[in-house]
């Protein structure tokens, strides 16, 4: 279960780019989280695109409306607690930036594009009207055996 929220100035991301990012951002996290990209796992991911008027985003203390050449964009990735090493987090962040650069046709991500990665503590996620544990998801077949073992080991401590 993952939520990927993208905040951008209205008009920054077109409908076709959103379609592409819905898949590529899901896959950017799923490959690391599950150890593979399984079509069934995609249903456990939501990508939210939030457009904000330029007068509702500020960077450096100045509204984006007053900075015509600046396009702030943030991506917040919230995942269920499991086995997330610093290297795995970095891999997700790098894959996220790669997906953004490809979809938005940019060679280098500008310094106003930021990605945050955070874990939601075990027992602090709910779905379908009840609390949900990542442990309950490990036997559904969307996690590789190796990845499931890492998560079980990490949460046993």
Image: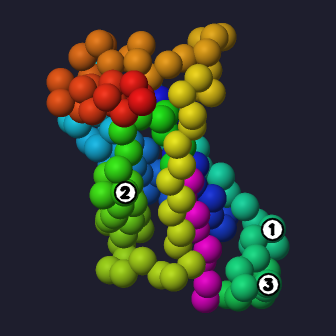
Q: How far apart are the two marked residues, 2 and 3, measured between alpha carbons?
A: 31 Å
122 shown above or below 16: above
Can you see residue 112? yes
Given residues 112 and 83, the one toward you in this image is 83
Q: Can you tell which quarter of the image residue 100 is in?
A: bottom left
Residue 133 is left or right of residue 123, and the answer is left
Measured as percent of width and height from the top left, residue 29 is found at 36, 45
Which stretch is magenta? 69-76
The residue sitting at 38% across, 45% down in the picture is: 84
Residue at 31%, 29% in the rendered image = 153
Q: CA distance from mark 1 to mark 2?
A: 33 Å
The answer to whether the residue labelled 3 contacts the one labelled 1, judged by CB atoms less than 8 Å apart, is: no
Question: From what the image shows, is residue 46 above or below residue 72?
Answer: above
Query: Where does the image place residue 122, in percent across and percent down from the top left?
Result: 54, 28
Residue 125 belongs to magenta span: no
Residue wearing tag 2:
86
Q: Mark 1 sits on what residue?
A: 56
**Is residue 92 visible from the viewing direction of this image?**
no
Name the mark nearer the viewer: 3 or 1.
3
Residue 23 sits in quarter: top left
Residue 75 falls within the magenta-colored stretch: yes
Q: Residues within 10 Å of mark 2 (few under 14, many from 20)?
A: few
Of mark 1 and mark 2, the one earlier in the sequence is 1
Q: Nearer the viewer, residue 139 or 56?
A: 139
- Viewer-nearest of discs 1 and 2: 2
Q: Earlier in the sequence, mark 3 or mark 1?
A: 1
CA distance for labels 3 and 1: 12 Å
Percent position of residue 129, x then y = 66, 11
Observer-nearest residue: 18 or 138?
138
The residue indicated by pointer 3 is 61
């Amino acid at each position: 279960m993952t939520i990927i929220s993208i905040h951008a100035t209205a008009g920054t991301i077109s409908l076709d780019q959103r379609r592409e990012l819905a898949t590529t951002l899901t896959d950017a996290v799923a490959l690391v989280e599950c150890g593979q990209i399984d079509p069934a796992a995609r249903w456990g991911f939501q990508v939210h695109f939030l457009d904000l008027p330029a007068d509702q985003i500020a960077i450096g203390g100045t509204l984006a409306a007053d900075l015509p050449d600046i396009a702030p964009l943030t991506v917040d990735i919230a995942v269920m607690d499991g086995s997330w090493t610093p290297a795995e987090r970095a891999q997700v962040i790098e894959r996220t930036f790669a997906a953004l650069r490809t979809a938005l046709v940019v060679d280098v991500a500008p310094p106003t594009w930021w990605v945050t990665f955070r874990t939601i503590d075990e027992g602090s996620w709910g779905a379908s009207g009840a609390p949900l544990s990542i442990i309950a998801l490990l036997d559904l077949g969307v996690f590789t055996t190796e990845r499931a073992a890492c998560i079980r080991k990490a949460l046993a401590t």
